[in-house]
Image (cartoon, rainbow, N blue to C red):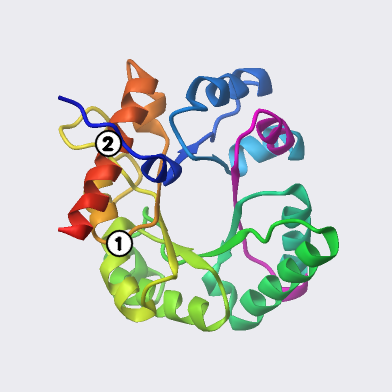
Amino acid sequence: MRMTPSRDARSRLIFALDMGDGIDETLQWVERLRDHIGVYKIGKEAFTHFGPEIVRRIQGLGGRVFLDLKFHDIPNTVAKAAEGAVRLGVAMFNLHALGGREMMEKTVQAAQKTAREAGAPMPLVLAVTVLTSLNDRDLSELGFQQTTQGLAAHLAAAAHRAGMGGVVASPQDILPIRKACGPGFAIVTPGIRLGGGGVEKDDQKRIDTPRDAIRNGADYIVVGRPIRLAKDPVEAADRIVEEIALGLADRES
């Protein structure tokens, strides 16, 4: 017997609309999944193809948007980009924590100021820690002395001190980040794959299941290919929402 997940569980599922098949074809996914997920992620691929129009059209269909452009530049440039993201009305956007404290602080301040002036909701501003495509060996080759978990927790703590609302991090980094930053600091986790196979981990090296990620403390999970490549994408999304609900229940047990 399948359980009936709560609206809270559904709101935690972010679907990655990272495709460039044409704006109308992309928006068909929004209409198809609108009652089955909480947020649509627009990354570099979709945004480069379609620009801000894709955000506005998703919003016109009632969808919430995570603008996943991973800003990384000098502080003033990223702050100006943040102003644009706020004016677009996105629910979330992100930047690289490696841009440093000043960049993060100025971005949060610019977003808050723009939201006040525009009478717009303040988006959740997230810092990207360590990409899920990188492992300890990759970090060593880049000159880092820390493990992926150690660096992710260090960057998350820096983001927390800078006033960021949360981080984007591998599901394998959730526990050290939660220990470093405490409750109330959002953790968004890509690198999610359903148990039992079906979709290879491809270029993402540090992955986990939806239930385990939520159980360990993730607030949102980002899923793309396991839904998009499924024989029945709606059923796949519903299955993931069920796993989210189970993970939330595990936290309470």
Q: Look at 30% across and 65% down and name the residue there.
A: 173
Question: SS class of the residue under badge 2?
Answer: helix
The residue type indicated by label 2 comes to Glu
The quarter in which the C terminus is drawn is bottom left
- Say how many tags the image has: 2
Residue 209 visible? The answer is: no
The quadrant in which residue 41 appears is: top right
Q: Look at 42% across and 35% down and name the residue there.
A: 224
Quick check: 73 left or right of 181? right
Give the residues in magenta: 54-76
The quarter in which the N terminus is drawn is top left
Q: Which sits in the foreground, 134 or 105? A: 105
> Within the magenta stretch, is there residue 157?
no
Question: SS class of the residue under badge 1?
Answer: loop
Q: Which sits in the foreground, 245 or 212? A: 245
The quadrant in which residue 3 appears is: top left
**In the rendered view, would you say 33 is above or below 110?**
above
Q: Which sits in the foreground, 25 or 204? A: 25
The residue type indicated by label 1 comes to Gly
Give percent across and percent down for residue 218. Answer: 34, 58
> Within the magenta stretch, is there residue 62?
yes
Quick check: 243 left or right of 154? left
Which of the marked residues, 2 or 1, is nearer the chain's N terminus? 1
Mark 2, residue position: 242
Give percent across and percent down for residue 168. Answer: 45, 60
Residue 72 visible? The answer is: yes
Give percent across and percent down for residue 116. Answer: 79, 66
Give percent across and percent down for residue 192. Answer: 32, 44
Mark 1, residue position: 217
Q: Look at 32% across and 26% down and name the residue there.
A: 236
